[in-house]
Amino acid sequence: MTYRFLKNASVCISFLFISTLPAFALDRIMGHGGPVKDLVVSPNDQLLASVSFDYSVVLWDTQSFQESHRLLGHDASVVTAAFSPNGRFLATGGDDFYTLIWDMNGIWGSEDPSPAAKFLHKGKIANITFSADSKLMASASWDGYLRVWSLEDMSLIAELAGHQGPVNAVQFLNDNSQLLSAGRDGHIRLWDLKEKRNTRSLVRNGWGVNVMHVDEKLRFIAYGTADGAMKIQSLDENDVSVTMASGKDPVLSIQYHPIFQKLAFGTAGGRVVIADMASSSVQNDFHITDGPVWGLTLFDNAEKLAVAGLDDFFTTLPVGISADDIEVEIPANRRFHPKLATMDNGARQFARKCSVCHSLEPNYKRRAGPTLYGIFGRKAGTAEGYTYSEALKNSDLIWDEITISDLFDHGPDVVTPGSKMPIQVIKNDSDLNDLVLFLKIATAPQN
């Protein structure tokens, strides 16, 4: 079947809201120590992978949502993931500029799985895709490049440049002979892999294109933009497109189920739009969270949706749920939604600079950094339960008022070079003194 486009670009797809389900159909799946950035389901629909600001990848059974495995290998936030079509490989990309390749055959039965390969860019990895035969993988990066890798010998076979700025999305086409890529420059570009060159732009949007997906059978490109548009364009007739939905918030996520022809978008304002491409209709349009929808994925025969945003959990819900049955609540006392106006300055600095990555309790709670409980007088790299970089494992640094002040005065790249700590400083002396005083009280061991 070929998707039929309307010639008028201002015409929106018709709305068809279906089914009303009770509010208790929403489930929160806990397991991360930081915001969840992306979600992806395996080809057999049995596993869901979630990736997080806490540097980890967690595999879940999609029936029970019990944790199956936790994968550690990135040295910064993990922001994107993809399974190969044959289910053998899981690729994860992060703010550490690396794409890690996990061989699923090596994960089962291993207590501490390691990646089979690591592929490097010079910027954040924004998106990953596999070829239909699972022999190739392509990565899109904010360094402005696309890279294509062979999974047979884990080698780089192409590096492509043409976008003006970061590249946000990539997908193989035409039996792996072509690539499509989307970038902040507003272009969706077509690449010839044999000639390793950009042949033309299929979309010139003006505003940046954040997300993209292509269905070669129905012959359409779906994409979401920085100015909030969710569009469908013909793969063959570049002047033919429709606007599925629009809004003021940037579109941050997209997912398409090719078997059931369901398409989902998520925005920076917590909105989710789901379309049934077989009937050319919007199936649902609702707000699920007060904040960004960084990742979403369809599973269980495209009857269910998992959504991730600015929390250390993700939410599962029926695709056909009524918007009236969704009550958007900000969970009480969550560190991602602090009430800064009611805090003293030291607590406020901790909330802004430290709370996403560090716990104040003995358990580090799977966060991106170790617990700060008992940090004063502790040797760097020794907090129990946390996996440190080699740089901190071999450090002689002792944490106290002076060294913690130095950390925020000069930055971790100077005080703890080679560590996983993100670079940040506090230049205001009063703010820094208040933070150190807060930490000394809040991290003191309780007898």
Image (cartoon, rainbow, N blue to C red):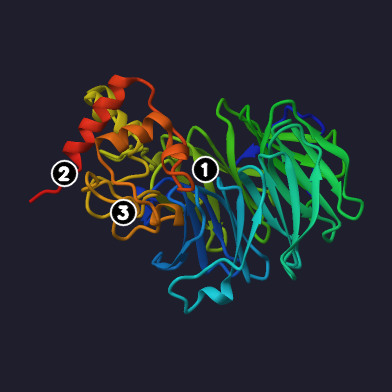
Q: In this view, does 435 lie to the left or right of 325?
A: left
Q: Earlier in the sequence, mark 1 or mark 3?
A: 1
Q: Earlier in the sequence, mark 2 or mark 3?
A: 3
Which residue lies most toward the front here? 396
Relative to the observer, which residue lies in front, 114 or 58? Answer: 114
Disc 1 is placed on an element classified as: strand
Where is residue 10? Give x, y as percent.
73, 27
Vertical relation: 405 (above or below) 47:
above
Mark 2 and mark 3 residues within 8 Å of each other at the beta carbon: no
- Label 3, on which residue? 365
Where is residue 361? Give x, y as percent.
22, 49
Q: Which of marks 1 and 2 is nearer the N terminus?
A: 1
The numbered dot on residue 444 is 2
Inspect this view and state whether residue 310 appears.
yes
| Disc 1 residue type (three-letter) | Trp
Where is residue 157? Give x, y as percent.
80, 58
The numbered dot on residue 294 is 1
Q: Residue at x 62, y 47 (%)?
A: 125
